[in-house]
Image (tube, grey):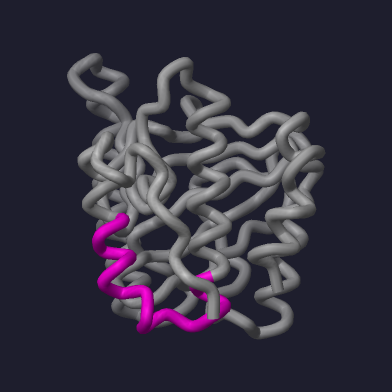
C-alpha cells in the first residue's frame, strides 16, 4: 500500500485549509484501502499542479481538492477513461449519476472513504473535469438526501452571487471553494503530455 506523499508547501503550513486537511489525511491514511490511497494521491497531485498552472502565486495546495474546487484537465479524456475503468473493475463503490455540471459524456462518481465525500468526474471541451463533493448519491439514501441538502446550499450561493452579495461556493467533504465550473483550476495539455502517463503508472490501477 502506498505511503502518503510529503506535503506540498501549502499543506506544510502555507495554506490553512490544505494544512488542516493534510493532517486529517495523516490521521486517516492507515484506514484507507490501497485503491483509495492511490486515488487520493492522484487527485492531490492533479489539484496541486492545476493550482500551479492556473495561478501566478499558488493559492490552495493539493489537499484542498477536498474543499470541492472544480478542475479541468486538457487530457483528451484519459483520466475519465482511467477512473471509469476502475469503477467497471469494481475497485470502488459508485457509478453513473447526474449532476448540475455540464458534461459531454456520462458523469460518474467514486465514493470515497467515510468523511471524504465522493469523486465526481465527467468530460468537457474534450478533457476530463473533476471535483470532490460532500455526499455520493449512488450509495445510501442517507448520502442521497445529504447531497440534496448541499445542492440547495450551493444553489443559494449562486443566487447570492448573482445578486452581488457573495461568491459561488462549491461544497466538498472538508470545506468550501469558489472554484466552480465558471472559475476552475486548469491543467494544460503540455503538462498532461509530459506527466500524465507517469502519474497513472505510479498511482493508477
Q: Residue at x 31, y 67 (%)?
A: 26
The answer to whether 75 appears left or right of 62 in the picture is: right
Please name whichever residue, 184 or 137, is drawn nearer the observer in this view of the structure: 184
> Is the magenta region chiefly helix, strand or loop?
helix
Residue 138 at what x, y percent from top left?
49, 75
Position of 82 relative to 127 (above/below): below
Q: Where residue 131 sits: x, y (%)?
A: 49, 49
Q: Closest to the observer: 61 or 134?
A: 61
Q: Nearer the viewer, residue 5 or 54?
A: 5
The image shows residue 115, relative to residue 99, as above or below, that is: below
The residue under the point 70% across, 74% down is 205
Q: Quadrant of residue 162?
A: top left
Rendering coords of residue 173 (x, y %): 31, 59
The residue that appears at 53% across and 57% down in the rendered structure is: 120
Q: Which residues are magenta?
A: 22-37
x, y percent for residue 105:
73, 52
Amino acid at each position: 500500500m502506498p505511503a502518503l506523499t510529503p506535503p506540498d508547501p501549502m499543506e506544510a503550513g502555507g495554506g490553512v485549509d490544505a494544512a488542516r486537511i493534510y493532517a486529517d489525511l495523516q490521521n486517516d491514511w492507515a484506514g484507507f484501502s490501497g485503491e483509495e490511497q492511490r486515488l487520493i494521491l492522484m487527485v492531490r497531485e492533479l489539484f496541486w499542479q492545476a493550482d500551479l498552472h492556473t495561478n501566478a502565486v499558488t493559492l490552495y495546495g493539493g489537499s484542498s481538492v477536498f474543499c470541492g474546487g472544480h478542475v479541468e484537465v486538457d487530457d483528451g479524456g484519459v483520466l475519465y477513461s482511467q477512473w471509469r475503468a476502475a469503477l467497471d473493475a469494481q475497485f470502488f463503490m459508485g457509478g453513473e449519476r447526474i449532476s448540475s455540471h455540464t458534461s459531454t459524456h456520462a458523469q460518474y462518481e467514486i465514493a470515497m472513504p467515510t468523511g471524504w465525500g465522493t469523486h465526481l468526474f465527467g468530460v468537457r471541451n474534450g478533457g476530463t473535469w473533476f471535483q470532490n463533493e460532500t455526499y455520493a448519491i449512488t450509495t445510501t439514501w442517507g448520502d442521497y438526501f445529504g447531497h440534496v441538502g448541499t445542492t440547495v446550499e450551493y444553489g443559494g450561493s449562486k443566487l447570492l452571487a448573482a445578486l452581488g452579495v457573495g461568491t459561488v461556493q462549491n461544497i466538498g467533504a472538508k470545506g468550501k471553494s469558489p472554484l466552480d465550473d465558471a472559475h476552475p483550476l486548469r491543467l494544460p495539455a503540455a503538462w498532461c503530455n509530459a506527466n500524465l502517463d507517469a502519474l497513472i503508472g505510479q498511482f493508477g490501477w
